[in-house]
Image (cartoon, rainbow, N blue to C red):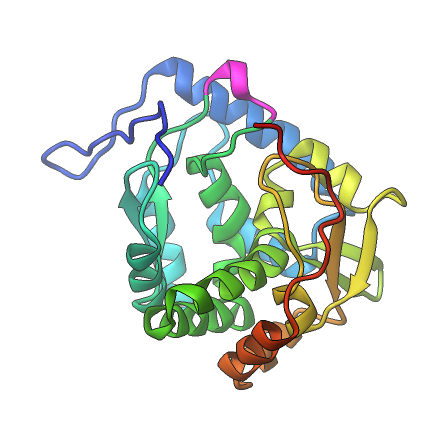
Amino acid sequence: MKATKYVAREPDAHGHIHYPDTEHAVWQTLIERQLKLLDGRACQEYLDGIEQLALPHDRIPQLGEVNRVLDATTGWQVARVPALIPFQTFFELLASKRFPVATFIRTPQELDYLQEPDIFHEIFGHCPLLTNPWFAEFTHTYGQLGLKATKEERVYLARLYWMTIEFGLVETSAGRRIYGGGILSSPKETLYSLSDEPEHQTFDVVEAMRTPYRIDILQPVYFVLPELKRLFEVAHEDIMAHVRTAMQLGLHQPKFPPKAA
């Protein structure tokens, strides 16, 4: 794992995490800016989840507030973690219906982009859709499969996660919409992903697993679900058979330049 300068905040004896006013201000800037952008761009299931979570604007929410809503809707919880966690821990958490949330928030200097997933990315980007049973089922199944997978198989599973949960788009009766948390928490990627600039491919499990990505650039290609329920259907397919097929076929050529050393 790469090192990070961010340190997750610890709760007090009552389970309450204290953040300084400067960090609450960052949360407020991020959430208010992003909510304006997502109208007409985020999928309805995400917007429904935002409404149910009723996230505060003027402060970073406590994990218990989020847990009450997730538990009542799909039986999920969020789990406090350090800034970066091993793959094994990640899969263990998802397999037990707990979504990892690092309890730190980006600095004002990194407002627009952060490689490490912070509390804004996890809570605002992912938790609204964890109120949706289709999305929740897919995420749970993904965690269970990842626990049993080999190191090589996990790399292919990671690409599936990236192309769906992090950077997925979906067709709706109102047009193409966003459901991936990596897009939903990024103002630049929100606008870019729905523009004519990147490539948009119809979602295919094996193709998603064969598509390389970089975490530090705008994505050159996005996979588009026909509907969000497709994730639920994928959860009930033999995903590991898809992994084996993808491994046999091998990776596609990257659609981006190599990262500078």
Q: Is residue 232 visible?
A: no
Closest to the observer, 126 or 148: 148
Q: In what quadrant of the picture does the N terminus appear?
A: top left
Closest to the observer, 233 or 87: 87
Q: Position of residue 228 (x, y in %)?
A: 66, 69
Please tell me which residue is depicted at 54% across the width and 60% down the height of the picture.
Answer: 161
Q: Position of residue 118 (x, y in %)?
A: 43, 35
Please tell me which residue is depicted at 38% across the width and 49% down the height of the picture.
Answer: 66
Please tell me which residue is depicted at 53% across the width and 14% down the height of the picture.
Answer: 109
Q: In what quadrant of the picture does the C terminus appear?
A: top right
Q: Which residue lies most toward the right here?
A: 196
Q: Is residue 240 visible?
A: yes
Residue 101 left/right relative to 25: left
Please tell me which residue is depicted at 25% across the width and 31% down the height of the picture.
Answer: 17
Q: Which residue lies most toward the left here?
A: 13
- Is residue 129 part of the magenta span, yes or no? no
Please give the range of residues in magenta: 107-112
